[in-house]
Amino acid sequence: MPLKAVIIVCDGMADRPVRELGYSTPLEAADTPAMDYLADIGVCGIMDPISPGIPPGSDVANLAILGYDALKVYRGRGVFEALGAGLEVRPGDVAVRCNFATVRNGVIVDRRAGRLDCRPFEEALMEVSKRIGPDVEAVFKHTTEHRAVLLLRGYGLSRMVSDSDPHRTGVPVMKVKPLDGTPEAGRTADILNGLSEMYMEALKNHPENERRRRQGLPTADAVIFRGAGQLPEIRSLEELYGVKSAVVAGNALARGVCVSAGMEPIHVEGATGSADTNLKGKAETALRALERFDLVYVHVKGTDNLSHDGNVEGKVRMIERIDRQLVSRILDETDLREVHIALTADHTTPVSVRKHTGDPVPIAVAGSCVRRDDVKRFSERSCAVGGMGRIRGRDVMPILMNYLGRVGLVGA
Amino acid sequence: MPLKAVIIVCDGMADRPVRELGYSTPLEAADTPAMDYLADIGVCGIMDPISPGIPPGSDVANLAILGYDALKVYRGRGVFEALGAGLEVRPGDVAVRCNFATVRNGVIVDRRAGRLDCRPFEEALMEVSKRIGPDVEAVFKHTTEHRAVLLLRGYGLSRMVSDSDPHRTGVPVMKVKPLDGTPEAGRTADILNGLSEMYMEALKNHPENERRRRQGLPTADAVIFRGAGQLPEIRSLEELYGVKSAVVAGNALARGVCVSAGMEPIHVEGATGSADTNLKGKAETALRALERFDLVYVHVKGTDNLSHDGNVEGKVRMIERIDRQLVSRILDETDLREVHIALTADHTTPVSVRKHTGDPVPIAVAGSCVRRDDVKRFSERSCAVGGMGRIRGRDVMPILMNYLGRVGLVGA
């Protein structure tokens, strides 16, 4: 049987010393027997997602962990959201993230339209989108709450356009502007501005808004765009390493990044991309996926959400739950002679900062090929003196694929 | 007296935990007092020949350890074999590796013609090669057993041609094909195909083949080509660092890589490039060379051969012999106030895999300038927590040359 691998990536799990925890990090404060066992039997290190000190977005960080030169191939976030939402995206397509927003007297008063479910608007906006032709096709898809994605397909499109989302309230919806002098950027801006007006018109007297008005709820009066993106120019993991791979992720962005690398997304009931996610279900799904795939990427988003909220206690509890319900379960059910298991975070999100920072993250890899080191605990500090030393995000996949015998020789 | 340096590179010495050795590596299982002393008094680290996870060929790995951006400058293996065989190679020349092969009924039945000594054919093929002109010159040189090299010199040649060696038996000698659309590649392919036929004709009734037929031995009926290469575009170590350097290597490939960097090859009687090599002779030669040269590169091939054979016990014994007959001897006879000694491997060749892999290798450097660390043993795991951290192959030469005061300041 060929060697296989699981990589577990806990979003924003790495942290800095926290005063309330006696200057331990949440990972150090948490009781994590399974993660510690993995570190104990494995080889450990620290990893800079991009390079030391550089805080990465989750899209760029996960692209790097998949082995790509993320800064070079990255072409905007929207495309990953579209892929994560299950849309098919082709080279040349432009995808943008959308929010439904509440507008009063010409200015945005709520960029999230009360976070209410906006699925009832999807059909009307999809219909309107069809009128944009004839040279371009637009697909509008609701995702969660106030969120949606818009995909443009046709010749001569460009991701080099500004957001119509002003990223603050009290101002009008902005005009999308071309960000370079190409006719493609100009044309894409025109299309998006046209759709922006058509959507506003369609939302004006939509029955769902009539209902919301009657009930005194925030209306969805506009769709605001941000993060235009196109597919990164990358070869799939199968092309690069000959592996069949799958992703188990509740979070659409992480899932989308993996799909862009050719991984098959596997749905897990109750995998929400939040702190209440179904970790047991993810573990079972990953274990079953290992029967069909060479590489399974398991992404847990909850740790990052709690970090952005500055929720110290919640982050510690979430890490403990990941340990018991995910890592422990995968370790118990896996034959380490056949499967390598890697555990890491995609970046540091200190609860004290509530934003991504550029600190390195811990990483541990266990399996039959690794050179076990003396590290006995999985944490930011203990792994820093491990046998793997300090690596970069883009080294992770070659290191794993080398254990699996999937990396071709350079030279002769 | 200027500071000097010796670097000892043991081919494929690094390994993974081996079950038969109680999950020690051969280097850990071996009794290596001299290597351990070097690690103890020196600074240690791990080194990725190219980058984490990437398995390098020996040519690329040694180019990197000499300080070059190996993937960028590498232009094929044949040229190193030609240099290693003592041929002069000029920019523009194309060199290929040759095997004498046994052909029956139009198909190759032995790619190595029984591994018999093929020197008796050299003169006839050299004569034939002269007829290839007028615009191109061909030099055919026998090296060892069934092996030879062929050098083409003239205008408009290219290394971008395929092998005529099918790399398996039961099929005919292949036609050399151009690998790109350049006229140079087409012309080079034509020349090689012409030589291929001329050699076959010349071998047909060669007296040595008549003799072999009479004695029932495998005949040498064809010369098959592989690994066309041209000189890497690199500056010599003397140009880069102002050092006079020499190489002590039984293996033609390693010697050729060093010669391409401007190092002087020093012959050692009995240095075979195999497990039975004359290590004491290499030690003596290296020590004598230190009187005339600033840098001496000692390459030992045997560890790699035994790894490719999966010979665990043999690899352990070979490492112990290197320790006693080479490392110990050089340490004993060297004044570490004047000479820095570096010890490493060019890549990992696990006995369990029998191929080069992309795992890092240990490195130790002793001498008056180093910052001694706490590492006391020379092994893959002990060096991983050393004071040098994790470096790349191309860092090794600048690190050594810096100790020697040979690296120019950048900036002001």
Image (cartoon, coloured by chain):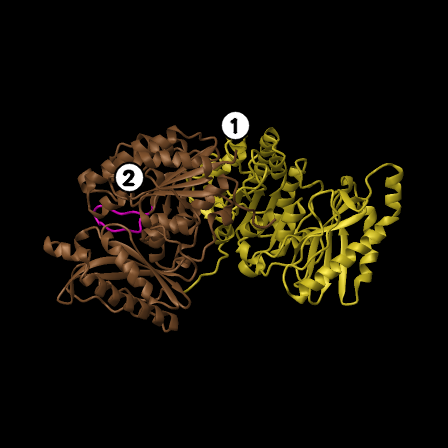
Chain colours: A brown, B yellow
The prevailing secondary structure element of the residues shown in magenta is loop
| Marks 2 and 1 share the same chain | no
B332 in relation to B140, above or below: above
From the viewer's perspective, tell me whether residue A130 is left or right of residue B402: left
Instruction: Give the residue type at disc 1.
Output: Arg
- Find residue B213 and report its image quarter: top right
Q: Nearer the viewer, residue B337 or A325?
A: A325
The answer for how far apart the CA atoms under marks 2 and 1 are is: 42 Å
The chain holding disc 2 is A
Q: Position of residue B100 (x, y in %)?
A: 77, 46
- Find residue A130 and report its image quarter: bottom left
What's drawn in magenta, residue-wise?
Answer: A347-360
Write down the residue under mark 2: A270
Say which element carries label 2: loop
At a point 89% along the width and 46% down the height, the residue shown is B207
Which label sits on residue B19?
Answer: 1
Q: Position of residue B355 (x, y in %)?
A: 58, 40
Q: Position of residue B261 (x, y in %)?
A: 60, 56
Which label sits on residue A174?
Answer: none
